[in-house]
Image: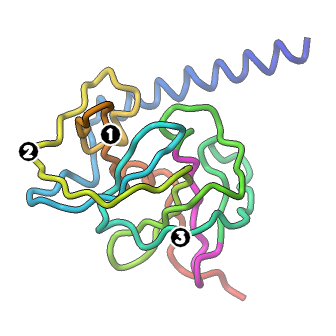
């Protein structure tokens, strides 16, 4: 009986998350837009999905640190971790993009991302690839029926797959904390 109740709660949570994504879409995408000039992007795999992040937003790629859980946080928020004097949110990128919650392993990596002047969050993923040069005209717009649409700048057609071009602002917008260091 308890197992059925847990399944119902998880299903209801999925429905609510889809509704939230639909509401965000209807309000219009805010935040980062596709650069007008050619740019470099870091390629990676998140939940087995090929992705890319504009290099200008990546501060470093590091092993996954221990994360302090956050009470009542959404499932895609792994917790917070220390980055210098900052406490940053760690985002389960595959889960944020619609996959089940990731069982974090030592082999996972964290892309520390920011706005150019300060770190904002860490994005959990599996493997890092290459840096690729992207011409904005080669980026295809995202169809509204794509569940990940609220988090994308577009898609990049490749020979055997389509790579998701991620918007750091949109991925992190619900997870940014107070930027001041903790008081001692």
Is residue 117 or residue 141 the one in the foreground?
A: 141
Task: Indicate the secondary structure of the residue bearing disc 1.
Answer: strand
Image x and y of residue 98, in percent? 51, 32
Task: Indicate the secondary structure of the residue bearing disc 2.
Answer: helix
Q: Is residue 99 above or below residue 172?
A: above
Span highlighted in magenta in the image: 82-93
Q: Nearer the viewer, mark 2 or mark 3?
A: 2
Is residue 25 or residue 153 the one in the foreground?
A: 153
Label 1, label 2: how far apart the Cα atoms are: 15 Å
Mark toward the start of the polypeptide (1 vs 3): 1
Q: Do the residues bearing badges 2 and 3 touch, measured as CB atoms within 8 Å?
A: no
Mark 2 closeness class: few <14, some 14–19, many ≥20 residues within 10 Å? few
Q: Residue at x 70, y 50 (%)?
A: 104
Q: Which residue is mark 2?
A: 137
Is residue 28 or residue 47 the one in the foreground?
A: 47
Residue 163 is marked as: 1
Residue 60 is marked as: none
Which secondary structure class fits the magenta region best? Answer: strand
Q: Is residue 174 left or right of residue 114?
A: right
Q: Which residue is mark 3?
A: 178
Image x and y of residue 79, in percent? 67, 57
């Amino acid at each position: 009986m308890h197992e059925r109740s847990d399944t119902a709660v998880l299903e209801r949570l999925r429905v609510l998350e889809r509704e939230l994504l639909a509401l965000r879409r209807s309000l219009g995408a805010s935040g980062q837009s596709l650069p007008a000039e050619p740019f470099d992007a870091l390629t990676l795999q998140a939940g087995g999905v090929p992705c890319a992040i504009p290099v200008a937003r990546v501060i470093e790629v590091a092993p996954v640190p221990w994360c302090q859980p956050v009470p009542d946080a959404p499932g895609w928020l792994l917790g917070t971790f220390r980055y210098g004097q900052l406490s940053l949110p760690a985002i389960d990128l595959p889960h944020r993009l619609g996959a089940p919650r990731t069982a974090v392993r030592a082999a996972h990596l964290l892309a520390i991302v920011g706005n150019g002047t300060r770190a904002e969050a860490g994005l959990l993923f599996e493997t890092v690839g290459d840096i690729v040069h992207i011409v904005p005209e080669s980026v295809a717009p995202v169809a509204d029926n794509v569940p990940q649409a609220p988090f994308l700048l577009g898609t990049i057609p490749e020979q055997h797959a389509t790579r998701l071009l991620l918007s750091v602002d949109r991925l992190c917008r619900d997870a940014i904390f107070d930027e001041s260091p903790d008081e001692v």
